[in-house]
Image (spheres, grey):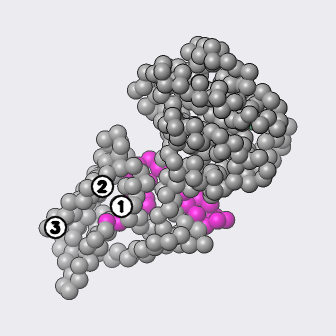
Amino acid sequence: MKKNNLIAVLGIAVLLLSGCSVSRPEVAQPVYDTAPAESGGLYVNGKYLKSYTAEETIYLRMDEFAEAMDSSLDVQPGIEEHECFLTDSIGNTTAYTTKTVEESGSSALGAIGGGLYDGSYWYQPEEDLLSGFDLHRLEDEEANCIYYTSYPEAEEIPEGVELPVMMYHAVSDNCWGIEELFVSPSSLREQLEGLQRNGYTTLWFEDLPYANRVEKPVVLTFDDGYEDNYTELFPIIQEYNVKVTIFLITGSIGTENYLNEDQIREMAASGLVSFQSHTVSHSRLTGLSAGELEEELWNAKLEVARITGKEPFVFCYPYGSSNNAVVEAVGQYYEFGLLMSGDTYVTGEDPLRINRKYVARSTDIESFGSMVSS
Ligand SMILES: [Zn+2]
């Protein structure tokens, strides 16, 4: 819908401008940055594209944008007009059109329809990309950063898909805390082998629009962001090539027994780990004032975005503690909310009250199997 609108608008602009003899339109030249600036940056799906300055129009280089969007880019130069096509991984194509304006002694080309082609690279203003690709835009004024993230909204998820969501915490035989929270690495391997043998596909919440395209979807979640998720869990998921979601307590990042920022970035870059939000301080949200609640939700969101370059959109309630006011507040900042133990979630049910199945140290492979399949 948006794609068609965009093409229509661009098409009208092309017609209007080519119909009358206009001189070269005034288009500000974009600033082409190549290295992250301390002052901030502009990120698409975790990929740094350029430093962020408060230009009136922010242009993004389309080849870099395409890479960040897992899309292919096809630029077709024409005599009068250039066309640029971006096709995402599931085959949706968005087209952009720009008219060339020749300039003697220069390869620089003017543009209309918002795009710019400088003879080597194609640039497009952020607003076009935002509307063409349904990207979510999170502005972090304090850090002078903008994070564009593609993630689904709850209403984009097909209904009626049975979705077992498994809940883990630590993965280690060194049980320095409550023993049941530490799943043995050998048990985890056994469970992943069982899932693969029985034809399950591990999904992120990012994948839920396509949950009905796999026969047996399953979501593996790990709460709190323990350091063993890097030392023990990460090598195992690389070996089995499975996707997991980790919920970070942002106030604990970098402290003893918790993941640090470098570990988080490395795991996020692997394409196997999606980092989401589990508040700043792991407080029971039902005991907080409205102001405190908002800080826990917003500051945790910003902090995860600052580390990963992606806006988190899934929230995990500490201790599963929630009431109507808490759920409503969570819904203002996040698309999905995860509780503790319960039945299998069926898509279409309340996305802010998603039940999970608790995998504990004492969970044996038989009970794991029946938890996943029931
Ligand atoms: Zn927790």
- Compared to residue 129, the image places residue 364 above or below, namely above
- Given residues 22 and 365, the one toward you in this image is 365
Kindly identify the amino acid type of the residue bearing the numbered disc 1. Met
On-image quarter of the C terminus: top right
Q: Earlier in the sequence, mark 3 or mark 1?
A: 1
Alpha carbon of mark 3 to alpha carbon of mark 1: how far? 20 Å
Q: Mark 2 or mark 3: which is in front?
A: 2
Label 3 environment density (alpha carbons within 10 Å; few <14, some 14–19, many ≥20): few
Q: Secondary structure at mark 2?
A: strand
Alpha carbon of mark 2 to alpha carbon of mark 1: how far? 7 Å
Q: Name the residue beneath numbered marker 2.
A: 73
Write down the region rendered in magenta. Answer: 122-149
Alpha carbon of mark 2 to alpha carbon of mark 3: how far? 20 Å
Q: Residue 187: x and y, percent?
A: 65, 26
Q: Name the residue beneath numbered marker 1.
A: 62
Task: Residue 131: tell me if it is visible.
Answer: no
What is the residue that sits farthest to the bottom in this orientation? 105
Q: Mark 3 or mark 1: which is in front?
A: 1
Q: Residue 230: x and y, percent?
A: 64, 45
Q: Name the residue beneath numbered marker 3.
A: 80
Label 1 environment density (alpha carbons within 10 Å; few <14, some 14–19, many ≥20): many
Q: Earlier in the sequence, mark 2 or mark 3?
A: 2
Marks 2 and 1 in Cβ contact (< 8 Å): yes
Based on the displayed image, in which of its 4 quarters is residue 245 positioned? top right
Residue drawn at (59%, 54%) of the image: 265
Kindly identify the amino acid type of the residue bearing the numbered disc 3. Glu
